[in-house]
Amino acid sequence: MAETKYNDKVIAIEDLSKSFGDHQVLRKIDFTVGKGEVICIVGSSGSGKSTLLRCINKLERQTDGKIYFNGCVVADKQRDINSYRSKVGMVFQSFNLFNNMTVLKNCMIAVTSVLHESKEEARERAIKHLKAVGMAPYINAYPAQLSGGQKQRVAIARALCMNPEVLLFDEPTSALDPEMVGGVLNVMKELAQTGLTMIIVTHEMAFARDVSTRTIFMDKGYIVEDASPQELFYHPKNPRTREFLSRFLEGDGSDSSDGDGKEAAGA
């Protein structure tokens, strides 16, 4: 592997921009992710958070800039992208489970088809991770038989079955009823304690404050602040960060000023 200035970083984003036609959504994004870091990305709807995550996972192709993984540039060839995605997993807002497969098969399918592991190994991994997220009793259920919170826990287990080096979460609780949010956040808190590298787009401000090792605030396609949660939440340097966090800081810390947390189109 060629030596680069990012060899000690799991992921590095360099000068990344993204436009949809004339609409620029991301503007010269730069940040790095070290092994074991838990980075929460917060900001208003339309600030570019989800688009940034989709670019990191190569679901969207950046307009400019580079993405490095373990010191190497992630190329745009599909074979390279597939290999990269097998190590950088993603958990979506809308679960993305296969409705015609049981919980167990949802967790096994990529292990056999992408990693080419045996069915026995895939089953073993699936049961292990379903147990870890409290979903082992539902291995023969279909997604239609599950609540939103249960589906999201299955989606997390499915991502873990790939043994990822990095796990990306795109607003993992925004599609859930309020009473189901806590269970999913608890699973994510436990994952953070295992040392797994995580990048989480979230509107759950108390979770970001308590769980992240770094918090990034985005506004209008820019990274405005990148700091420890203690610094960002209680000593924000930028006026826009202070404005965004004002309701959270004045309230009980259980919610954010980000409405329902869903991104505007293209953001």
Image: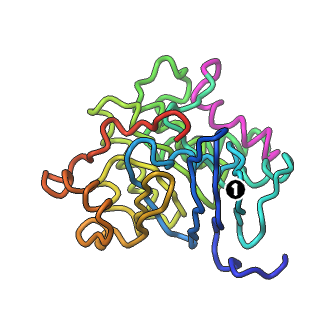
**In the image, 152: left or right of 233?**
right
Residue at the image position 57 percent from the left and 45 percent from the top: 51
Residue 245, position in %: x, y? 25, 56
In what quadrant of the picture does the N terminus appear? bottom right
Give the image quarter of residue 173: top left
* Percent position of residue 131, x then y: 49, 43
What residue is drawn where x is 28% and y is 54%? 244
**Viewer-closest of 41 and 192:** 41
Residue range highlighted in magenta: 99-116
Amino acid bearing label 1: Lys
- The residue that mark 1 highlights is 87
Q: Is residue 112 magenta?
A: yes
Is residue 11 in view? no
Q: Secondary structure at mark 1?
A: loop
Closest to the observer, 143 or 65: 65
Rendered location of residue 185, percent (x, y): 36, 47
Q: Quadrant of residue 206?
A: bottom left
